[in-house]
Amino acid sequence: MPRTYLKKAPLHSRSDDTKTQEIVRGILDDIEAGGDAAALKYAAKFDNYDGEVLLSDEMIKAASALVPEQLRKDIEFSHANVKKFAEAQKATLKDIEVEIIPGLVAGQKSIPVNAAGCYIPGGRYSHIASAIMTVTTAKVAGCKNIIACSPPRPGVGINPAIIYAAHVCGADKILAMGGVQGVAAMTFGLFGLPKANILVGPGNQFVAEAKRMLFGRVGIDMIAGPTDSLVLADKTADPMIVAADLVGQAEHGYNSPVWLITDDQELAEEVMKLVPTLIDALPELNRENATAAWRDYAEVIVCETREDMAACSDEYAPEHLTVQADDLPWWKERLSCYGSLFLGEETTVAFGDKASGTNHVLPTSGAANYTGGLSVHKYMKIVTWQQATQDGAKPIAEATARISRLEGMEGHARTADIRLKKYFPNEDFVLSLEE
């Protein structure tokens, strides 16, 4: 069906940044070779910080005392919600066992990774909520070692609210180090830390590139790009709320796409009038980000039917998807590609970002086509096991020997042969398809 673009983004994707890749590779190689001293060198250079990098209990206590009481209560409220949702998610992972054939039992077991490295941005914005989202889920998953890492501010250190949030949510160690050097420190096990098995949390392009390069040596939550958000709205939507939600996400960064898909052109035109006014009312830095994001990456699309709206949304596979339209159950059932779904104007992306309980570390750049966001499942290894009686092993061994020989894998076949000869010495077996 035809779609009308009332606003088309002149910029659609980022080009490969080979310069960033070169910089990150050089830093990672240098730190892996140079250890603690090299990491401290980069901390002094990029963080402009020469204080203690591993926070002591006394430092955590002192920082926590600086956090206003209401903010502490808000952090605790958010933590409780995220913890409750994460515990419910974990409950869906059950150890199982099943008898495949008589005498052969196989099973599944969920095991948390030993060490999780949680990166918490603290530069332009102090991401208190990221501490809650990453550390809480690792704790609920059962990770024995949780390292929270956040960039310190020159001469000051980590934002006290981030320290308090990480501590309350269960971080075992808090590392005052940002950027590639912080990611490297967790990965390589510097400063006496256990080597991280998984790296999670958002970050700038250097952090994202470091995680991408290290993937394989460690697990990662995802390869993240700029945050994005899409609103589906029909004639029942409030144009002001739609516009506010678009602007609220555009302030993330100059390259953060926001999209509106609707079947009501009048609504679309009204939203397009309201957005610039709402952007102009933002503080300076937020205004600069939102202005660039709206100008260069935003799109407004008018579809003929709600089915085409849903299909268009699935093509974008947004990180955040908001539905402000009639018949919410239909949308919930129909939509299939998104990181997190917000149904009705009574909820908004910011709720999920900060306090409602679902995780805000989500797939970007279309990755919602094949993956979901951060959850306790990301920290869990789903492993399998099996155990057999001698009689149960018999038909498995016979089939294994024949399949292995057909594949040309004689050593595999003989591991089956030796068991058959030991357990059933008086029987003859056909262990090759040629026999």
Image: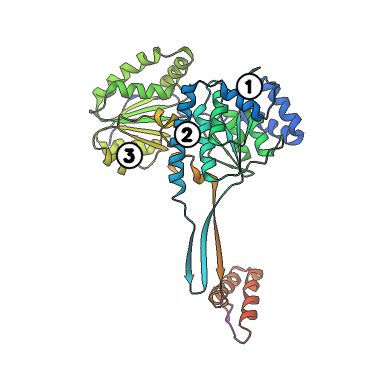
Amino acid identity at mark 3 = Ala
The residue sitting at 53% across, 56% down in the picture is 109
In this picture, residue 4 sits left or right of residue 77: left
Q: Nearer the viewer, residue 82 or 263?
A: 82
* 290 sits to left or right of 196: left
Q: Quadrant of the C terminus?
A: bottom right
Q: Which residue is mark 3?
A: 311
Residue 79's disc is 2
Mark 2 or mark 3: name the one nearer the start of the chain.
Answer: 2
Tag nearer the camera, 2 or 1: 2
Q: Position of residue 208 (x, y in %)?
A: 57, 32
Q: CA distance from mark 2 to mark 3?
A: 35 Å
Sooner in the amino-acid sequence: mark 2 or mark 1: 2
The secondary element bearing badge 1 is classed as loop
- Observer-side mark, 1 or 3, equals 1
Instruction: Please state which of residues 87 and 34 is positioned toward the viewer in this rendering.
Output: 87
Amino acid type shown at disc 2: His
Q: Which mark is residue 333?
A: none
What segment is highlighted magenta in the picture? 428-435
Secondary structure, magenta segment, majority class: loop
Secondary structure beneath dot 3 equals: helix
Residue 417 lies in quadrant: bottom right
Along the viewing direction, whichever of 277 and 44 lies nearer the viewer? 44
Judge the density around disc 2: few (<14), some (14-19), many (≥20) Cα neighbours within 10 Å: many
Work out whether residue 204 can be spotted: no
Residue 157 numbered mark, or none: 1
Image location (x, y in percent) of residue 120: 56, 30
* Mark 3 Cα shell of 10 Å, populated few (<14), some (14-19), many (≥20): some
Residue type at mark 1? Answer: Gly
User: Per the image, is 430 magenta?
Assistant: yes
- Considering the numbered disc 2 on the image, is that residue within a helix, a strand or a loop? helix
Q: CA distance from mark 2 to mark 1?
A: 23 Å
